[in-house]
Image (tube, rainbow, N blue to C red):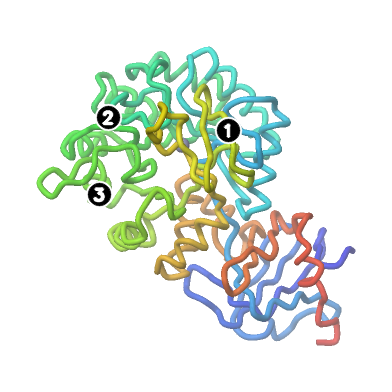
Amino acid sequence: MRPGQAPGGSLLLAGGRVVTPEGVLSPGWILVTGDVIGAVGPGDGPDQAAPRLPVIDLRGQWVLPGFVDLHVHGGGGTSFTEGTADDARHAAAFHRAHGSTTMLASLVTAPLGELEARAALLAGLAEEGVIAGLHLEGPFLSAARCGAQDPRHMLAPDVGVFERLRAAAGGHLRVITLAPELPGAAEVIRAAVRAGVTVAVGHTDASAEVTSAAVDAGATHATHLFNGMRPWHHREPGPAGALLDRDEVTCEIIADGVHLHDMTVRLAARAAGPGRLVLVTDAMAAAGMPDGSYWLGSRQVDVAGGVARLAGEAGSPGAIAGSTATMEGVVRHAVAAGVPVPEVAAAASTTPARVLGLGDRTGALRPGLAADLVVCDDEFGLSAVMRHGQWLSGFPAVARLSRARGPSR
Ligand SMILES: [Zn+2]
């Protein structure tokens, strides 16, 4: 057995601050058995550990559940929205290396035939287990709040179109973002709910009342709360107010230091609470890449200083277009903004896993779940990522962490 690996065997991660659904164990330990978490507990290790159990010393490190990103278009120079299946695999690998052990692939508004082709290609990756499914961010969106989405290809909500896209995704469509004020939206919401697809409200100019009616019809998720929607006003709280107001709605935020003020991040976290807040990247191909020009679907995006904007008219900055964030980065930023670590872990992992119906498989450091976890240093810099009991390669820190304290411990 290679050091730090547990193929079929067992491995003890000890000495770290372990973030569990019940609180932080400091120190705590995790027994990894094959590809699952066998046991978790406080203190230095289980009383009756097998005598030759390999031990990884995680003193000075945080251990968090592997991140679950519900909203991501690409990263590492390639994307889910264009290119080959290998390009999409590369983008997924990039985000896995930054802690996202589970992710959806998000598509943006495009001509219908193109969307069907992309959905079919990504369905293959879902079959392989590379991604956990698809998120359709479009085409039923509001041109008034299009952000970086191409308004030329937006469509009025239509159950027939929805069913075509769902069929193309071969049972792997998990989330659809739509604008509930558009005619026909209620019918699509009901069709999606019947099909087991989560309906997210986003890129919308709806009033609070129309948004609440969409929740009544079955919408249960908010796509990047505050961004791409009519802004909050104290007499007209808009979609953001209505979505925060409803206990059944989980609320995505992009806590990258660009899309939202830190105060907004803290207020959203407090208003939604740990069971409803979801951290996402909304990352595009430029994540992890140098400044320059990239594509988001059909639209050219210029990245300067790590901020992605639509290529604007001369002299005027274009709309913010996706992000260059990673889950590692938004987790670090949310902690720095003042969100308590256990709430950050819930928002980055536990709650989005529940949204996907995977709460009994991943998203928490709990016995019986997949051994999907991330190890972070004191400043929440990533030290290592484990997925299904295997350390991901490419982490120099893994070798350092893997100096076990020895079997005699
Ligand atoms: Zn997006």
Asked whether the beta carbons under mark 1 and mark 3 sit within 8 Å of each other, the answer is: no
Under circle 2, the secondary element is loop
The disc labelled 3 sits on which kind of residue?
Arg
Residue 8 is left or right of residue 165, and the answer is right
Tell me if mark 1 has few (under 14), some (14-19) or many (20+) residues whose alpha carbon lies within 10 angstroms of its own: some
Please provide percent x and percent y for residue 10. 78, 68
Disc 1: which residue:
293
Please provide percent x and percent y for residue 292. 59, 37
Disc 2: which residue:
180
On screen, 311 above or below 303? above
Asked whether the beta carbons under mark 2 and mark 1 sit within 8 Å of each other, the answer is: no
The answer to whether the residue bearing label 2 lies less than 8 angstroms from the nearest atom of ligand 1 is no
The disc labelled 1 sits on which kind of residue?
Ser
Please provide percent x and percent y for residue 343. 43, 65
Q: Residue furthest front?
A: 315
Tell me if mark 2 has few (under 14), some (14-19) or many (20+) residues whose alpha carbon lies within 10 angstroms of its own: many
On screen, 360 above or below 236? below
Q: Earlier in the sequence, mark 1 or mark 3?
A: 3
Please provide percent x and percent y for residue 75. 61, 41
